[in-house]
Image: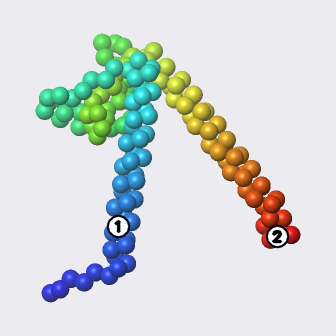
Amino acid sequence: MKLRTTPGICVLAVLGVFFLMSCAAIKSQDAQSTEELLSAAGFVMIPAETPEEVANLNTLTPLKVEFSVKDNKPLYWYADPYNCKCVYTGDQAAYERYQKFNVEQNIADEEQDAALMNEQAAADANMWGWLGGPWGW
């Protein structure tokens, strides 16, 4: 039996692979940004170096700040089994700094997005003004 493929199936397969690669790149970029904020806030990176540490790392919720109590004190951690193969750990003060930095980063991102949108709107207005409107009036 001969298996036949159509160009449409090949195109869909290529698009599917591209989509998955794009999602992985975005996830990696988000993780890097989060890890930079965690480091700046005072979290300590602990690499998983032994097979036991790697196995333990793989049991933790990945790419999400989690909370627990150790020695009657709050402990926060962020596991990254994909990029750095490490865990970032921090205390309450580090977590509060991380939250502050995260809010500041979100505000900066929104301001940058607004500036880009305003720049694009101004460019569009200039283009239409030169042509006399969208229909050349």
Applied colour scheme? rainbow
**Mark 1 = which residue?**
14
**Front residue (pair 60, 106):** 106
**Front residue (pair 9, 88):** 9
Say few, some or many: other residues with alpha carbon within 10 Å of mark 2 (under 14 / 14 to 19 / 20 or more). few
Query: Residue 106 is drawn in which quadrant?
Result: top right
Say few, some or many: other residues with alpha carbon within 10 Å of mark 1 (under 14 / 14 to 19 / 20 or more). few
- Asked whether, in this view, residue 89 is left or right of residue 119, the answer is left
Find residue 85 and report its horizontal and vertical position in percent.
Answer: 26, 34
Q: Earlier in the sequence, mark 1 or mark 2?
A: 1
Residue at far left of view: 51
Q: What is the CA distance from the residue labelled 1 to the residue labelled 2?
A: 41 Å
Residue located at (37% from left, 60% from top): 18
Q: Is residue 127 above or below residue 77?
A: below
Which quadrant is home to the C terminus? bottom right
Find residue 47 and report its horizontal and vertical position in percent.
Answer: 24, 27
Find residue 133 and report its horizontal and vertical position in percent.
Answer: 82, 65
Query: Residue 15 is drawn in which quadrant?
Result: bottom left
Q: Is residue 60 visible?
A: no
Query: Residue 100 is drawn in which quadrant?
Result: top right
Residue located at (14% from left, 29% from top): 50
Find residue 101 and report its horizontal and vertical position in percent.
Answer: 52, 25
- Asked whether, in this view, residue 27 is left or right of residue 123, the answer is left
Q: Is residue 83 visible?
A: yes
**Front residue (pair 81, 74):** 81
User: What label does residue 136 carry, if any?
Assistant: 2
Q: Are marks 1 and 2 in contact (CB under 8 Å)?
A: no
Label 2 sits on a secondary structure element that is: loop
In the image, what residue type sits under mark 1?
Val
